[in-house]
Image (spheres, coloured by chain):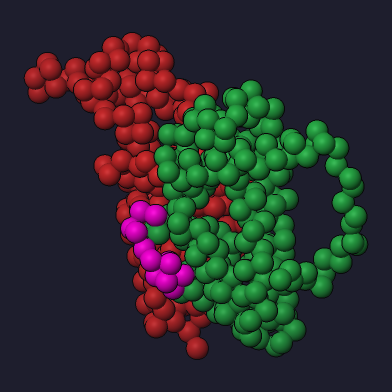
Chain colours: A red, B green
Amino acid sequence: MGVRETQKLETRRKVLESARDLFNEIGYEETTIRAVAERAGVSVGSVFTTFASKADVLSQVMDDRVEHLYRELEHVAKHMRGSTADRLCSLFAIHYDFECRRVRLFLAHISASFSPTLDRNTIPFGRNSRFRGMIIDMLAEGVERGEICPMTDLELVLDTLMAAYAWNYRLAAAQGCDAATMTEIMDRQIALIFKGLKPH
Amino acid sequence: MNHIPMRMNAPAIRPQKMTRRAMAKQQTREKVLQAARDLFIERGYEGATIRDIARAAGMSTGAVFASFADKTELFDAILNDDFAGLLDPMQDAFSASTTAKEALVGMFGAAYRAHSAQLPLIQAALAASWTRTPEAERLRRESLRPIRSLVIQTLERGVERGELAAKFDQRLISDMLWDLYLAGYRPAAFEGLSVENQTDRLAERIEVILTAIKA
């Protein structure tokens, strides 16, 4: 790899780390690119050669974070024990735990995903196909195991689960709830949804 | 026509005679809200400045700040008013329906229809909702209470009519239904769905929940 490319990667890494910390410490709106550049020890110009906008920075911060998580989850998922409902509970519990480590950052991410001025290139929250893929796989296995009615529209169940997962974060936003609280609620929501999925 | 739900037996309140000053303040507030609403729709939340809003309302920025601490507060006031206005059409949908699904789809569909001309505004409101102050959150919850209560009433009516199972966590279900409704705004905005499509999509997801609590 050329020196130029190495430097570019290093800049990217430093910017993402600084942005991640600043977004979490003082908030997304409050953080300027200048502040990020300063923390990262790079010039504002070099930030903009790698990133299109602040929103782009946020998007890539989140992508990098979950990349790591999902790689682990994909390995772990197949070892998860219990019913399909149990396994899904575990999956979401891990995700809540993960995001709550930097909750302010996550809230900025979910907030940005509703922004009407969203960039075409940014991957908004909820469209992460890798996580969705894991859930669909578990649901499909649930059908094979005879726990879920074969007529079920799995995509619909997925959407319903994802909506519940996402909007539970409003508890963190409004009441400062922790991962354990949100997980407890998600567990009940999953149990409820599964009541309706039983084969006849 | 005002449909006052049976539960909310509000005593007839005689409006106190407002002082001239109070009336003037109220009028200013209304003018600013209207101007702000139009500008937010036209230029989005970021694009509309307090200065522009003040000018459109025909007053000074000082006058605007006398009624609203900042743009966020102004924006929240518009949305709270908005939700208050939704109560009647949602109540109508509730009264006109027989099944729980009909009621919910009718009610939320009415909201989607009312908001279809101002999706960017709703998007901005949803974006802002994740970072709202506790006080703003309290005010928003207040303005939503009558509507959220309608959702609970729908579930209760479903149980009374033997359509829904007797024992389920009404609060949990009502929250999930509400969250599904809110979640329906984003695909509508990003994929340019029609109100019909948006409502149909919600109906499918509501069905997943209702299936779990059918009698």
Q: Is residue A118 left or right of residue B121?
A: left
**Residue B30 location, quadrant:** top right
Query: Does the magenta segment cover residue B194?
Result: yes
Res. B86 visible in picture: yes
Is residue B71 at all visible to an observer of this figure? no
Q: Is residue B214 magenta?
A: no
- Classify the position of the C terminus of chain B by image quarter: bottom right
Residue A10 in which image quadrant = top left
Q: In terms of depth relative to the viewer, which is nearer, B50 or A1?
A: B50
Q: Is residue B207 above or below residue A86?
A: below
Residue A181 versus residue B2: which sits nearer the camera? B2
Is residue A77 positioned above or below B34 on the image?
below
Magenta region: which residues? B189-200
Q: Position of residue A57 (x, y in %)?
A: 34, 30
Q: Residue at x 72, y 80 (%)?
A: B157
Side of A161 where B82 appears, left or right: right
Instruction: Pick the residue in front: B74 or B212.
Output: B74
Overall secondary structure of the magenta section: helix
- Quadrant, the N terminus of chain B: bottom right
Choose between B162 and B107: the one closer to the eye: B107
The relative height of residue B141 versus residue A18 in the rendered view (above or below) is below
Q: Position of residue A96 (x, y in %)?
A: 52, 46
The residue under the point 44% across, 48% down is: B120
Residue A159 % position (x, y):
43, 63
Residue A147 shown left or right of residue B99 in the figure: left
Which residue is outermost to the left? A2
Q: Residue at x 53, y 30 (%)?
A: B55
| Residue drawn at 45 percent across, 53 percent down | B119
